[in-house]
Image (spheres, rainbow, N blue to C red):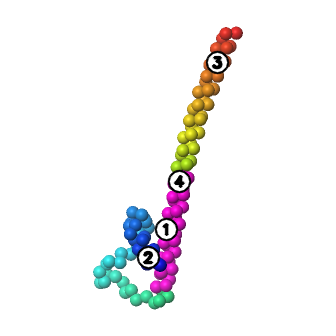
């Protein structure tokens, strides 16, 4: 399960996951890599941490999309309210002109 999810994250590429800059490149020549003799517990801990990071990345991606949607809705509402405010200002100006003309007639 982890391998499939990790492969999906890797396929999305670095542009989809900015945190990928901190991921160790696994294609380095062996002479530059550190000794990778880890115990089963260390591998398990690493697997758990990777699983947690994948879940966090997915959750944050969903949350980000929700925030983008909410931002779009609020932007639309702001534009609608600005139009209504402009219309109200025009109506008030018309009423003031009408009152001034009625005042001048009397």
User: CA separation, marks 2 and 3?
Assistant: 73 Å
User: CA separation, marks 4 and 1?
Assistant: 18 Å
Disc 4 on helix, strand or loop?
helix
Q: Which residues are magenta?
A: 43-71
**Residue annotated with mark 2:** 4
**Residue annotated with mark 4:** 69
**Residue annotated with mark 3:** 98
Q: Evaluate if marks 2 and 3 touch, with contact meaning CB atoms under 8 Å apart.
A: no
Q: Where residue 16 appears, x then y in whole percent?
A: 42, 64
Task: Tell me if mark 4 has few (under 14), some (14-19) or many (20+) residues whose alpha carbon lies within 10 angstroms of its own.
Answer: few
- What residue is rendered at 39% in x and 86% in y? 36
Task: Tell me if mark 1 has few (under 14), some (14-19) or many (20+) residues whose alpha carbon lies within 10 angstroms of its own.
Answer: some
- What residue is rendered at 40% in x and 89% in y? 37
Q: Where residue 28 appears, x then y in whole percent?
A: 31, 78
User: CA separation, marks 1 and 2?
Assistant: 15 Å
Left or right, residue 2 beside residue 74 = left
User: CA separation, marks 4 and 3?
Assistant: 44 Å
User: CA separation, marks 3 and 1?
Assistant: 61 Å
Q: Return the residue found at the far right.
A: 106
Left or right, residue 71 beside residue 37 = right
């Amino acid at each position: 399960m982890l391998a499939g999810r990790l492969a999906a994250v890797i396929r999305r590429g670095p542009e989809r996951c900015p945190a990928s800059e901190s991921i160790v490149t696994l294609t380095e020549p062996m002479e530059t890599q550190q000794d990778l003799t880890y115990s089963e517990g260390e591998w398990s801990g690493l697997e758990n941490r990777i699983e947690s990071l994948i879940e966090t990345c997915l959750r944050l991606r969903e949350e980000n999309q929700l925030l983008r949607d909410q931002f779009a809705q609020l932007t639309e509402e702001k534009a609608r309210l600005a139009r209504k405010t402009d219309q109200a200002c025009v109506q008030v100006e018309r009423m003031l002109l009408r009152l001034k003309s009625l005042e001048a007639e009397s």
